Amino acid sequence: MITYKNIKRYDDIEFRDYLAMQGLSNSYLKSEVNGIIPGIQVTDNMKIGSMVDAILTDNKRIDFASPYYETGRNIAKKILKEFGDLIPKFDKQVNFTADIELELEWYKYSMPTKGRLDWLIPKQAVIDLKVTKSTNLNELIKFMGYDSQVWHYSRIAQAKAAFLIVHCIKKNTTELIQVDVSGPNKFWESKVEKHGTIYQL
């Protein structure tokens, strides 16, 4: 069973300062191989997604000279058209640190962690933004581990529910998808056991 302890919230933190915080993030744990993150090729789709994210959640990161700005702005306008009444009510770019504890029969593991949420409704829901060319969103969520990502966010933020706002570039559609975070999560259990400090009970 996993529990989150020593949870701390940080607002108005620049992304570079979040990266410098102690703790292992979902991005690191998803990518690492023997403690090393392989080189990641940044695709056009990833750059568009980052631009949309900046426009909607962190205006300080917008590069108006970027060749991806116009596309990102159009997608952001589409998302705002669908969810514009809700988004201003969300807390943006909320950062957390915590210690995750995994208790097994004879041992306990403890691992420092962190998370940077796109949006938060305190104590109620975490919401993460995704931009994709994939048209099979359920398959995408499982393949990319987005379900495990928002599971972690819901626990570290002590929120009851988790959602993804997913924009499909090919279909020019935006969907709100609820992710079930009520049960345990094998990905996070395995990562805490691998990277955590072990204690005998």
Image (spheres, grey):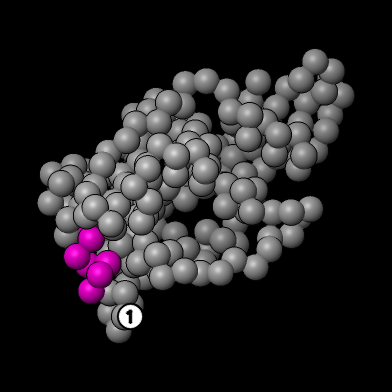
Residue at 70% of width from left, 34% of height from top? 190
Q: Main secondary structure of the magenta part?
A: helix
- Using residue 154 as the reference point, say whether residue 81 is left or right of it: left
When the figure is inspected, residue 68 is found, relative to residue 10, above or below; the finding is below
Circle 1 Cα neighbour tier, 10 Å, few/some/many (<14 / 14–19 / ≥20): few
Residue 10 in magenta stretch: no
Question: Magenta segment range?
Answer: 70-76
Residue 110 visible within the image? no
The amino acid type, in three-letter code, at marker 1 is: Ser
**Residue 60, located in which quarter of the rendered image?**
bottom left
Q: Nearer the viewer, residue 32 or 157?
A: 32
Q: Nearer the viewer, residue 183 or 133?
A: 133
When the figure is inspected, residue 177 is found, relative to residue 45, above or below; the finding is above
Residue at 22% of width from left, 67% of height from top? 73
Q: Nearer the viewer, residue 85 or 79?
A: 79
Q: Position of residue 80 (x, y in %)?
A: 17, 53
User: Which residue is identified by label 1?
Assistant: 66
Q: Position of residue 39 (x, y in %)?
A: 65, 68
Extreme residue toward the top, this view: 105
Residue at 47% of width from left, 69% of height from top? 43
Residue at 70% of width from left, 39% of height from top? 191
**Residue 50, located in which quarter of the rendered image?**
bottom left
Residue 71 in magenta stretch: yes
Extreme residue toward the right, this view: 200
